[in-house]
Structure formats: structure tokens, C-alpha cells
Amino acid sequence: MRLSLYFFILLFFVGASFSEEVFADEVSWFEVKEDKGIVTPKDSLTIFYGRTTWNNLSDIIVGDIDLTGYEMMSFTYSERYADLERFFYIWEDVVLEWEFGISPHFGNQEFWEFHIANNVRWYNFSWDDSVRTTFEFGIGWSQASEVPEVETERVDNYTEKGLIFLSFEVTFADPNWEHTEIVLRNHHRSGAWGTIGNIDGGITGGSDSLLIGLRHNF
């Protein structure tokens, strides 16, 4: 548990150090890179629906998907706080975001989940004139109000309410949709290969939920 506390503190100070410099410039809600004509949203609200799978992340990557009866919705707010081009000039089309999410779970079990994360988002692809696309990876902390039964069934009958949170996301939008995107996300909870957990060897599993959502940028 001590390691998870250090992890949270690190995320907080990294985000604060970036946001202090960026927000001092009073960036508008859509920032335009004039040399490229790129527009990136500053704030976003997203609503998701999905189901937890019986599969590991490696199975999902190769298309091996077996859905459970555990369902969820997720409501997230995210805010861009840094453009990496301002700090690392080799990463021109990457932004950093922080995200907070509330997720009611239902179906085979009812409980609440809360997560906070730092996200890295890639944008500006060659096909954006046809389909505007972004890719995102997020890492943070997930806290459930109850021990998720689906995880105990998958992880040798042991898991914990608090686990590492990961997200893998792709968004799609018509170029004319200035404020709206369709979102596909993998919502992942795990012990990060045994990094955390109050048992010998830590928690080596978790859960993966496949979500589809609608995002409003403002």
C-alpha cells in the first residue's frame, strides 16, 4: 500500500509542475497551432457503456474476447494540461491530460468505481481529412467500493479494491464534428505484475472491460 501512495504523489506533482506553466498562458478552450492548423480540445466529458471480459489484455489485443455478465457505465472528465512540444521538441503531436472518472457497475454485481489518471494522447494523422483520429494511453489509480467479484473469479480468488488503472483508447470523428467524438476504450485494472497487493508476490491479475462512448469537447 505504501508503494501505491508514492505512485499517487508522483502523479500529482508531475501534473502540477506541467499545469503551473501551461495555465499561466491562459490558453483558450481550443488551442490552435497556427503553423499546422491543428485544433486540440482542452476539456472533455465522456459517457461510456461496456462489459468486463474474462480475458487478459494480451488476449484482447489478438481479438480473443469473451464477455461476462458484469456491466458498467463510466462518466469521465478530462483536461489537457500540457503540450509536449513545449517541453520535448521531438514530440510535436502529443498532449498530456488528467482524467477523473466515476463508474457504476451493475449486472452480476453492483458497486462503484472511481479512477484518476494521467493520459498521453497522440493526434494529427495523415487520414484526419477523412476520419479525425486520436490515440490515448492513460495510467493512474482505480478504487472500487467493493471487491469486484469478476476479479476474484479470474485471479485465484484474490484481488483488492484499489488497483493500478490503465486505459487504451482510440477516438473517431467526422472532420466536421468540432465537438463530438466516438470513443473505444479498454478499461484495465491490475496489480501491475505483482507490484501491489497484500499477499506474497502481489496481485498478478485484474480485469479488462471493453467500452464504447461518446465524448463532448468544450
Image (cartoon, helix red, strand yellow):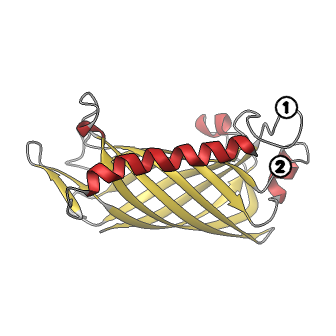
Amino acid type of the residue that numbered disc 2 sits on in the rendered structure: Thr
* Residue occupied by mark 1: 201
Check the image and report above or below for 74 versus 57: below
- Local packing at callout 1 (Cα closer than 10 Å; few below 14, some 14-19, many 20+) is few
Gap in angstroms between the C-alphas marked 2 and 1? 12 Å
Residue 145, label in figure: none
Left or right, residue 89 beside residue 58: left
For the point 83% across and 46% down, the residue is 154
Q: Quadrant of residue 89?
A: top left
Across and down, in percent, residue 62 comes to 60, 34
Across and down, in percent, residue 41 comes to 28, 59
* Residue occupied by mark 2: 159
For the point 25% across and 37% down, the residue is 85
Check the image and report above or below for 25 versus 137: below
Across and down, in percent, residue 104 comes to 66, 71
Question: Is residue 166 visible from the viewing direction of this image?
Answer: no
Left or right, residue 29 beside residue 153: left
For the point 26% across and 27% down, the residue is 90
Q: Of 71 and 168, which appears nearest the observer?
A: 168
Pick out the residue farthest to the top.
Answer: 90
> Mark 2 or mark 1, which has the lower sequence index?
2
Question: Is residue 160 visible from the viewing direction of this image?
Answer: yes
> Which of pointers 2 and 1 indicates the residue nearer the eye?
1
Q: Quadrant of the C terminus?
A: bottom left
Pick out the residue farthest to the left.
Answer: 35
Left or right, residue 47 beside residue 158: left
Left or right, residue 18 beside residue 33: right
Amino acid type of the residue that numbered disc 1 sits on in the rendered structure: Gly
Across and down, in percent, residue 22 comes to 27, 51
The mark tally for this picture is 2
- Local packing at callout 2 (Cα closer than 10 Å; few below 14, some 14-19, many 20+) is many
Helix, strand or loop for disc 1: loop
